Image (cartoon, rainbow, N blue to C red):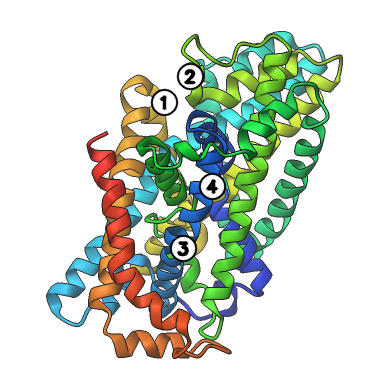
Amino acid sequence: MSSTDSNHFSSRIGFIMAAAGSAVGVGNIWGFPTQAATHGGGAFLLVYLVLIVILGYPMLIAELMIGRHGQTNPADAMAKIGNTPISKKIGKLIGFTSIITATLICTFYSILSGWFVSFAAAPVAGAFGFSQASAWLTDFSLSRNLIFTTIFILMVIWVIRQGVQEGIEKWSKRLMPLLLLILVLGVVYILTLPGAMQGLKVLLVPDFSRIWEADVLIGALGQTFFSLTIGTAAMMVYGAYLGKKENIAKLTAYVTLTDSSVALLAALMIIPAMYVAQHNGVQIFNESGGLLNSDTLVFTVLPALFATLDGSLQYILAFVFFVLMTIAGLTSAISIVEVPTSYLMEKTSMERNKAAGFIGALIIFLSLIVVLNFDTLFGFMITITTERAQPLVALGIAVYLGWVWKRNNLLQEIQEQQDVDSSRLFWRIWPIYVRYICPLLITLIIFQLFNG
């Protein structure tokens, strides 16, 4: 990674916003409330918050530490830790697999985020009386999907082409505060509506008897894992853009806190909104008490809720909500697309504009193949990346850092941080924790996912 200023974050707040933006994605605002609603509300929330601390936080530190140590792309950063030709090759393979995983994640993620863009445009068309256009924007037709998938990817590439400071950092600083503001206003508004308090009780009052249920534990483990983008190498790339003296434990704490806050705010808005919708006559549960349309919750229950509101309010709320979803999709997609872009720039000496354009064209091509074979490939891409490759890559990273990175070299990396004493309890425990506990927890996820 070139050491020029433009290839590093210019400020801590810039890094925190970018890294939090990477972690805060559709998984938080779409996935987390859906998981919480399906797996016992308060019990799920409690387990999730514990797992963020015991798995998410230490693994995020690991990825950032490897990236900053390497100051290069994930494949070469992993190889740098190895101390034998074989261990270097294994490290490069793990890093390269994470780059391929990130690229494939972009395919379904761009389609999903394209839906958010079109659903944000629909109420604007509806408010101006273009009912036919509004209907087209919210149906799942081939033409709509092809157009808005492409639009979303072009938005991402436009940001990435501007570089680390002028693109990723600047837009993260703009979009993340806007996302938080919309979420807070959404929570305040939804909680004033009839029926909301029932949803709030479901979310905040845990049924302790459900905490040890396998579905709740595994759902929370998976959500912890995927919401922080662990195993996609995005954090390794952002770690490479960090200065050597930055305190990684402190920065990671801010990122983890922001990510968890957004997930909680999203749940505080969406779960009460479900009960408001139910109060207004929208069916959200089936006869056995299970959630209807859990995978498409935000595309079915929430628009149905908006439709029950009076006059222009339904259009305003629908527009604001789907702008929020678009921002969440955009901040995550920027970090994921930066992974293959940074790799291509280093390996070919291609300048950023061309590398971003090439990767953008590749992702558009792959995404449109998925759109054209939606029933076969959409679910397959989600499974192969988030349920197979991501956990395996994360396991590789934990084992590699814990068992291959020589202790003295790791201690030296820790000591280079400003105001950090490697003899403190946290830094004495962390390497051992990543060596033993993280692989154990990740193996549990993998076992459940592969046998689910």
Labels 3 and 1: the sequence-earlier one: 3
The image quarter containing residue 71 is bottom left
SS under mark 4: helix
Find the distance from the CA under tag 1 to the CA under tag 4: 37 Å
Q: Name the residue under label 3.
A: 235
Mark before the other along the chain sequence, 4 or 3: 4
In front: 17, or 28? 28
Question: Between tags 2 and 4, which lies in front?
Answer: 4
Residue at image mark 1: 371
Residue 129 x/y as whole percent? 80, 11
Q: Is residue 371 above or below residue 267?
A: above
Residue that appears at 44% across and 91% down: 423
Q: Which residue is drawn at 52% across and 23% down?
A: 296
Vertical comparison of 163 with 425: above or below: above
Sequence order check: which comes first, mark 2 or mark 4?
A: 4
Tell me the kind of residue under disc 2: Gly
* Residue where numbered disc 2 is placed: 290
Under mark 1, the amino acid is: Val
Q: Is tag 1's residue or tag 4's residue first in the polypeptide sequence?
A: 4
Q: In which quarter of the image is residue 98?
A: bottom left
| Cα gap from disc 3 to disc 2, whole angstroms | 36 Å
Q: Which of marks 3 and 1 is in front?
A: 3
Q: Position of residue 23 (x, y in %)?
A: 53, 53
SS for dot 3: helix
Which of the 4 image quadrants contains residue 433?
bottom left
Does residue 176 sit above or below 326 in this rendering?
A: below
Pointer 2 local density, CA inside 10 Å: few below 14, some 14–19, many at least 20: few
Question: Could you tell whether 84 is left or right of 380 in the image?
Answer: left
- Between disc 4 and disc 3, the foreground one is 4
Q: How crowded is mark 4: few (under 14 residues within 10 Å), some or many (20 or more)?
A: some
Figure disc tally:
4
Q: Nearer the viewer, residue 379 or 106?
A: 379
